[in-house]
Image (cartoon, rainbow, N blue to C red):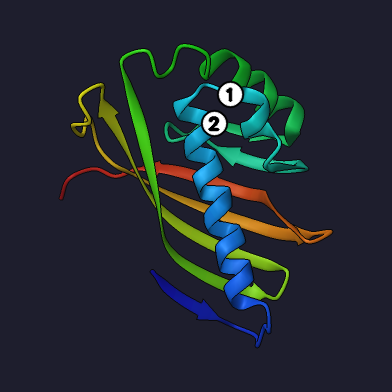
Amino acid sequence: MNTKTANTNTNTQADLEAIEEVIATIEHSQVNELPEEFLSLFRADAIWTTAHGKVLWGLDEIAEFTHKALPGAMANGSVRYELVDVLFIRPDVAAAKARGQYLTLDGEPTGNPTSPLYVMTKEDGRWLLTANQNTEQFPG
């Protein structure tokens, strides 16, 4: 993973580990179809754009979508996320780039990978998803 820091941050390693934990929790909550765990990662005023371009404004819209989409989503497979890069815009604001891949039940890649970008803010010592887009990657 590459790390770029715009400002000096004495807690960079701890912050990187906390951001990696957010990415791991995204994966865990999706693989295990746990909407409340997933939703706990967001600020109340967060923006989420799905891989297919649906824009969700605020936790209420994100929750409504998640409660419809997540249960049953992993019946035929799984998903894996990997943190690729973090840019600390400020000590309390980070842009985290990840790589996502949906998998068959046998662990084989299915469909195109995704390239999520998570802009996170650190609030009360906790990194929260604030402005996010999960973009499907197409070949070529």
Residue 64 appears left or right of 44: left
Residue 99: percent from left, percent from top = 36, 50
Residue 2: percent from left, percent from top = 40, 74
Question: Disc 1 on helix, strand or loop?
Answer: loop
* Displayed quadrant of residue 94: bottom right
Identity of the residue drawn at 65% across and 57% down:
120
Identity of the residue drawn at 68% across and 26% down:
36
Question: Disc 2 on helix, strand or loop?
Answer: helix
Farthest residue to the left: give it: 140
Name the residue carrying label 2. 29
Residues packed near mark 2 inside 10 Å, few (<14), some (14 to 19) or many (20 plus): some
Residue 4 appears left or right of 93: left
Disc number at residue 126?
Answer: none
Mark 2 → mark 1, Cα distance in angstroms: 5 Å
Residue 103: percent from left, percent from top = 27, 30
Identity of the residue drawn at 36% across and 40% down:
80
Which amino acid does the dot numbered 2 rest on? Ser
Q: Is residue 41 above or below residue 130?
A: above
Rendered-image quadrant of the N terminus: bottom left
Count of numbered circles in the view = 2
Name the residue carrying label 1. 34
Residue 54: percent from left, percent from top = 53, 30
Pick whichever, 50 or 32, lies toward us: 32
Residue 7 appears left or right of 139: right
Q: Is residue 17 above or below residue 98?
A: below
Marks 2/1 in contact by CB < 8 Å: the verdict is yes
Which amino acid does the dot numbered 1 rest on? Leu
Residues packed near mark 1 inside 10 Å, few (<14), some (14 to 19) or many (20 plus): some
**Which one is earlier in the sequence, the residue at label 2 or at label 1?**
2
